[in-house]
């Protein structure tokens, strides 16, 4: 089975490595993208904070690759991909929709970091933590014309622990994703992989997120504030608030709830100099790691 990989992230690179040695498949080409690129919902460009340069992997493995600098319907790009004669596309760590012009060349499959049809759309792991979910997962599915809506070939679940941050949850998901690829590839190569239609009545869709979405809304309880911070800590730009004409980016808060009677929701500086995020009910969370920037 001749595979073309499409990837531009750390996880995507790990998937390419798995595809290279995968049972019943030959990695015949790779499409990747620069770290900053324009996209439909932000024409000015977005920055992939999980970016990985896959060029060294491709060069060392003698695998042809192309960096996509235009759109996915670029005629020269499509011609090059057709020349690789793929039997299948595998997509991981990619921000762009795969148009029909690609899916007409070969069937396309990808990984989405949620238990589809739940949390389709953008930033599924961030949204899952923000929303206080206790479980998530990763899904291997076939692409169709919709957003994360094609039939499911494989799925694995994992718990979201109270101490998880977006970084630790990503690490869990990466391991599950690599396991899923190793299980699914042989079935695809043999042509006996089951394809389960998604239950549309269970679908939830979430938008992509931008750095400005990290602005903290203090009119919520301490649990929601705690989840908001850990969902957007490094490698993401972080949750933040504005105080005294400075931007304070919060990387970590304590899980212990501190009662601060009489304190209104917002940032609060204690007499010992400690900073707290105070939510509804005058319950605060002590900030343990932060950066201060000029507003």
Image (cartoon, rainbow, N blue to C red):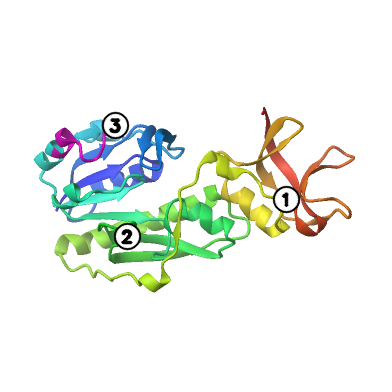
Q: Is residue 83 magenta?
A: no
The tag on residue 140 is 2
Query: Residue 148 in the image: x percent, y percent?
Result: 34, 58
Q: Quadrant of the C terminus?
A: top right
What is the secondary structure assignment of the residue under circle 3? helix
180 vs 19, left or right, is right
Query: Residue 18 in the image: x percent, y percent?
Result: 29, 49
Total of numbered circles in the picture? Answer: 3
Q: Residue under circle 3?
A: 55
What is the secondary structure assignment of the residue under circle 1? loop
Query: Residue 103 in the image: x percent, y percent?
Result: 18, 52
Going from the N terminus, do you reach mark 3 or mark 1 first?
A: 3
Which residue shows up at 30% across the image and 31% down it?
Answer: 56
Q: Residue under circle 1?
A: 254
Q: Residues within 10 Å of mark 2 (few under 14, many from 20)?
A: many
Q: Quadrant of residue 137?
A: bottom left
Q: Nearer the viewer, residue 13 or 72?
A: 72
Q: Residues within 10 Å of mark 1 (few under 14, many from 20)?
A: some
CA distance separating discs 3 and 1: 40 Å
Which residue shows up at 54% across the image and 39% down it?
Answer: 211
Q: Quadrant of residue 180?
A: bottom left
Marks 1 and 2: CB-CB under 8 Å?
Answer: no
Give the extent of the magenta segment. 70-78
Marks 2 and 3: CB-CB under 8 Å?
Answer: no
Q: Residues within 10 Å of mark 3 (few under 14, many from 20)?
A: some
Q: Nearer the viewer, residue 171 or 203?
A: 203
Which residue shows up at 63% across the image and 59% down it?
Answer: 162
165 vs 38, left or right, is right
Going from the N terminus, do you reach mark 2 or mark 3 first?
A: 3
The tag on residue 49 is none
Evaluate whether residue 125 shows in this view: yes
Residue 130 to residue 244: above or below: below
């Amino acid at each position: 089975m001749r595979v073309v990989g499409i990837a531009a992230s750390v996880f995507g690179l790990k998937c390419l490595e798995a595809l290279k040695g995968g049972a019943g498949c030959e990695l015949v080409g790779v499409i990747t993208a620069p770290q900053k690129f324009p996209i439909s919902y932000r024409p000015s460009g977005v920055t992939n904070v999980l970016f990985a340069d896959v060029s060294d992997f491709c060069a060392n493995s003698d695998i042809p690759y192309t960096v996509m600098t235009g759109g996915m319907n670029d005629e020269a790009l499509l011609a090059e991909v057709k020349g690789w004669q793929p039997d299948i596309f595998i997509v991981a760590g990619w921000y762009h929709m795969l148009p029909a012009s690609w899916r007409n060349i070969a069937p396309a499959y990808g990984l989405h970091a949620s238990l589809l049809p739940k949390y389709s759309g953008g930033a599924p792991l961030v949204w899952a933590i923000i929303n206080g979910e206790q479980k998530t997962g990763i899904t291997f599915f076939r692409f169709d014309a919709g957003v994360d809506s094609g039939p499911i070939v494989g799925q694995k679940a994992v718990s979201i622990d109270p101490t998880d941050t977006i970084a630790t949850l990503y690490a869990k998901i990466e391991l599950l994703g690599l396991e899923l690829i190793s299980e699914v590839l042989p079935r695809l190569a043999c042509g006996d992989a089951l394809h389960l239609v998604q239950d549309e009545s269970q679908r939830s869709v979430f938008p992509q997120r931008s750095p400005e979405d990290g602005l903290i809304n203090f009119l919520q309880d301490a649990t929601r504030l705690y989840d908001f911070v850990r969902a957007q800590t490094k490698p993401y730009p972080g949750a933040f608030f504005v105080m005294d004409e400075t931007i304070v980016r919060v990387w970590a808060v304590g899980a212990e709830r501190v009662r601060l009677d009489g304190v209104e929701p917002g940032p609060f500086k204690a007499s010992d100099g400690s900073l707290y995020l105070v939510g509804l009910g005058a319950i605060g969370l002590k900030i343990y790691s932060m950066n201060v920037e000029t507003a």
